[in-house]
Image (spheres, helix red, strand yellow):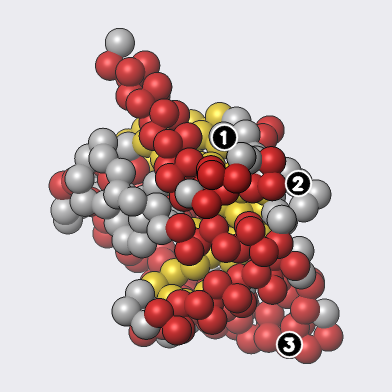
Amino acid sequence: MIRLILAVLFVLIFLVGGIPLLIAEWIIGKFNMDLKSRSSLAIVQWAFKVVLFLAGTRVIVSGEENVPKDEPVLYIGNHRSYFDIVITYSRVPRLTGYIAKKEMLRYPLLRDWMKNLHCLFLDRKDVKQGLKVILTAIDKVKEGISICIFPEGTRNKFNHTFMEFHEGSFKIAAKTGCAIVPMTIYNSAEIFEDHLPRIRKTEVILQYGKPFYMKDLPKEEQKKVGAYTRNLIMESYEKIKEEKMQ
């Protein structure tokens, strides 16, 4: 339980103690919005790395050289843990907004940092609002901001399985022409979700696949790019699993 207590205490101290930082970021944004975004990213990435350290999480990263540094991309990953956001966000090389569930808006201070980082909030029960979020995400990419989405739509509660990837998520790439970067996350639920309420010392693998552009895919695969990306991540996941079992 000590890891859970330390991680929760740190998050609370960061959120409350960081109020002056939020005020400073608000002031900076009045004069230089890009500087505000970049400084907010640096602060939150530091905080996430501290959370991973306190949780005893060792992240083994491979394929990071595949991530374009000079253009916005659409990150697509499988999703089993709340720590997936912490793990992946601490690695992004440029401004990146995550698409999160609207329930995150309930949490003051946390939502302010998320808004500083260009995160968008999706109501999964409202199709019309969901379309607006996708359109906003398209605008973000056109402004040079990467977007990350977990297209299963929610955390998968079953180990070594994958839910359907919602095709609507990929309109962001279809309308902007940006690269899609598949992310395979292995063993993240072992940190917390697989044995609530304890946090355990865990080794997690984050593997970035080679980026691809929808325009380079055959017409039929462009129509089912969600299934195509899901298969890429599943193949990567199974390879990792086999290596771990040897």
Distance between the alpha carbons at the discs numbered 2 and 3: 28 Å
Q: Please name the residue shown 65% across and 69% down the image.
A: 138
Q: Amino acid at mark 1?
A: Gly
Q: Which residue is mark 1?
A: 209
Q: Residues within 10 Å of mark 2 (few under 14, many from 20)?
A: few
Q: Which mark is residue 27?
A: 3
Which residue is nearer to you in this view: 90 or 147?
147
Q: Residues within 10 Å of mark 3 (few under 14, many from 20)?
A: few
Distance between the alpha carbons at the discs numbered 1 and 3: 38 Å
Viewer-side label of 2, 1: 1
Q: Residue furthest front?
A: 220
Dot 2 or dot 1, earlier in sequence: 2
Relative to 59, say whether 21 is above or below. Answer: below
Q: Position of residue 223 (x, y in %)?
A: 52, 52
Q: Residues within 10 Å of mark 1 (few under 14, many from 20)?
A: many
Locate residue 144 relative to residue 76 in the image: left or right: right
Label 3 secondary element = helix
Which residue is nearer to you in this view: 18 or 29?
29
Distance between the alpha carbons at the discs numbered 2 and 1: 15 Å
Label 1 secondary element = loop
Relative to 184, say whether 177 is above or below. Answer: below
Locate residue 246 relative to residue 226 in the image: left or right: left
Dot 2 or dot 3, earlier in sequence: 3
Q: Which mark is residue 69?
A: 2
Locate residue 239 relative to residue 89 in the image: left or right: left
